Amino acid sequence: MIILLKRGADKKDIESLRADLTARGFSLHESTGTTESLIGVVGDTSILDQSTIEARACVEQVTRIAEPYKKVNRKMHPENTVIDVRGHKFGNGSLQIIAGPCSVETEEQIMTTARAVKAAGATMLRGGAFKPRTSPYAFQGLEAEGIKLLLQAREETGLPIVTEIMAEDDLPLFEDIDVIQVGARNMQNFKLLKALGKLHKPILLKRGLANTIEELLMSAEYISAGGNTDIILCERGIRTFETMTRNTLDISAVSLLKQKSHLPVCADPSHATGILSLIEPMSLSLIVAGADALEIEVHCTPTRALSDGGQQLTPEAFSSLMDNIKKMAEFLGREIG
Ligand code: PEP
Ligand code: MN
């Protein structure tokens, strides 16, 4: 961290700043020029609050040099983190395809969809039992019953289950779930993130609707700081001024996250675009960008879906998408599974 001092700042104020920083264990490297004077602060500056230092009368500006995230930073951990979910690995170069409906609706719906995505080559099953809906009058999910149906689908198909948690109180219901998803709307629910940090279970952390890449990494840092390092980051599109797509898919975030962090990265072209015809080109692009996994919505009868009907692929469309995903994976020398 570099502190630029104000010209003509009071010497006593500067001395008090120095004393406070050295008392907290930082070493200081000062440089006094004819026009500017700087203090370089060396140590774990992630614990320092930039605005509190800037509030001092002698300080002109504070610049962070080191990223505020440590545990999830590739600089601290150059090797990829590899997460094993029932033998399927994230982060070792293989590609995981997580497919299934937006919401778990009925036994028949989830079982039919699970069988279809398995037959097409998906490696995991998704489905929301707890649904974060914009309207309180919209379908809210089957909750505990939905979790039960997902486990029944795993029992038959062998596909590991990825499903979203909305509240810490529901954690006991997720004991047998393979990957707990934190949805975009909860990316900065810090109490929930801290609770997930205490688990020994993989977490799929989706980027918030209006959150920066650094904020996503800081949310992963919350989970990691608690001791749970099995985190899969997920790009799912962000809000921009564009209205033709549901969100704007930030493909560059996938490649950048892989560079900045050692954690595996997933991408969700369904919520990112909301447009059926874009799911295939975006899926293929995301694989090229380096995604370790894709999360894609598939419903046995999308026209009867209780949520996100317009963006869910039919089993036939998913099967044809999988044919091209397989070709792309083969071209890039990546294994699916
Ligand atoms: C979902 O995956 O079901 C979902 C609600 O996605 P997001 O949190 O990205 O909107
Ligand atoms: Mn959905």
Image (cartoon, rainbow, N blue to C red):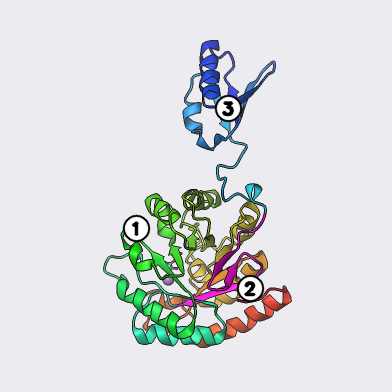
Residue that label 1 marks: 168
Category of crowding for the residue at label 1, using alpha-carbon neighbours closer than 10 angstroms: few (below 14), some (14–19), many (at least 20): some
Residue that label 2 marks: 284
Residue 91 magenta-highlighted? yes
- Going 37% across and 50% down the picture, which residue do you hit? 191
Mark 1 to mark 2: distance in Å? 35 Å
Q: Return the disc, 1 or 3, that comes first in the chain's sequence.
A: 3
Which residue type does callout 1 highlight? Glu
Q: Return the disc, 1 or 2, that comes first in the chain's sequence.
A: 1
Left-right relation of 326 to 111? right
Query: Could you tell me how many numbered marks the image carries?
Result: 3
SS at mark 3 in the image: loop
- Going 35% across and 84% down the picture, which residue do you hit? 107
Q: Nearer the viewer, residue 14 or 69?
A: 69
Give the magenta range. Answer: 79-100
SS at mark 2 in the image: helix
Report the disc number at residue 26. 3
Q: Quadrant of ligand 2?
A: bottom left
Q: Is residue 268 above or below residue 79?
A: below
Report the disc number at residue 22. none
Q: Nearer the viewer, residue 304 or 331?
A: 331
The N terminus, quarter of image: top right
SS at mark 1 in the image: helix
Category of crowding for the residue at label 3, using alpha-carbon neighbours closer than 10 angstroms: few (below 14), some (14–19), many (at least 20): some
Q: Residue 157 in the image: state x and y as whole percent.
A: 48, 84
Mark 3 to mark 2: distance in Å? 47 Å
Q: Nearer the viewer, residue 210 or 254?
A: 254
Q: Nearer the viewer, residue 183 or 84?
A: 84
Q: Return the disc, 3 or 2, that comes first in the chain's sequence.
A: 3
From the viewer's perspective, is the residue at label 3 or at label 2 nearer?
Answer: 3
Q: Residue 190 in the image: state x and y as whole percent.
A: 40, 50
